[in-house]
Structures are given as structure tokens and as C-alpha cells.
Amino acid sequence: MITTTTDTVPGREITELVGLVRGNTVRARHVGKDIGAFFKNIVGGEIEEYTKLLAESREQALDRMVAEATAQGADAIVNMRFATSLIAQGAAEFLCYGTAVRLAQL
């Protein structure tokens, strides 16, 4: 599945708008890993546990959006965006959304 943040697919013609597609996940921090993050915050540096959590969350939201577009018969997703929102203390939603389209055959 072609995914792009632009409103066109270079070299391809969009023939049909399928519609809005999205994927999301809600993730919470792990209390045990928060302790390590606390100490890392004191001495400085990357908090790898959080970096990994955020990357996995974005990938899961993206995979769910692509699955929705595939189920609707789309060839590509244009204008793809990510958004996050705080749900509760220590939990956040990761949302990926875009416009599913069909492309002209090559």
C-alpha cells in the first residue's frame, strides 16, 4: 500500500476517492520502566523504553489504517497524518489517518 503525506502520488493518477481511513491505539506506560526513566531523566540521555513504545504505537496505528484502506479496496493513502492525545495519566492515543484512494492502472 502506498502511503504518503502529500495529496498526490507522483507518477500516478488518482481516479477515485474511497474516503477517510484511520487506525489508532491507546498505550500506557509501564510502571517498572518509569523508574528507569526517572533516573535517566536525572542524568540525561535518551529514554529508550519510551522511544520504543512510541515507535511501536505509531507502527500499530499505521498498520490498522492500512488494513482499513485495504479492506475498502484502496490502492493508496494520501494526506497521511499522525496525531496524539492524552487519554489519562500515563496513557495516550496514537491516531494515524488519511484519505484512501484508487489509482489508475499502469
Image: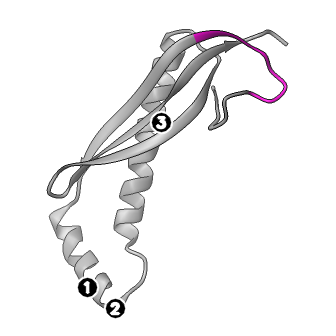
Q: Amino acid at mark 2?
A: Val
Q: Quadrant of the C terminus?
A: top right
Q: For residue 77, which quarter of the picture? A: top right
Where disc 3 sits, the SS reads helix
Residue 75's label in the rendered image is none
Residue 12 falls in image quadrant: top right
Q: Is residue 19 left or right of residue 47?
A: right
| Residue at image coords 85%, 25% | 11
* Element class at badge 1: helix
Judge from the rendering whether residue 85 lies leftward or rightward of residue 9; answer left or right.
left
- Residue on which disc 1 sits: 39
Give x and y (percent) for residue 82.
46, 42
Q: Quadrant of residue 37?
A: bottom left
Magenta stretch encompasses residue 2: no
Q: Is residue 91 above or below residue 94?
A: below
Residue reaching furthest bottom? 43
Residue neighbourhood size for the residue with mark 3, other residues' Cα within 10 Å, grouped as few (<14), some (14–19), many (≥20): many
**Cα distance, mark 3 to mark 2?**
33 Å
**Residue 99 versus residue 103 in the image, above or below:** below
Sequence-first tag of 3 and 1 = 1
**Rendered residue at 29%/47% (across/down):** 85
Instruction: Tell me the crowding category of disc 2: few under 14, some 14 to 19, or many 20 or more residues within 10 angstroms, Cα based.
Output: few
Pointer 3 and pointer 1: residues touching (CB < 8 Å)?
Answer: no
According to the picture, the residue beneath numbered tag 3 turns out to be: 62
First of labels 3, 2 by sequence position: 2
The magenta stretch spans which residues? 9-17
User: What amino acid is at disc 1?
Assistant: Phe
Judged left or right of residue 74, residue 38 is: left
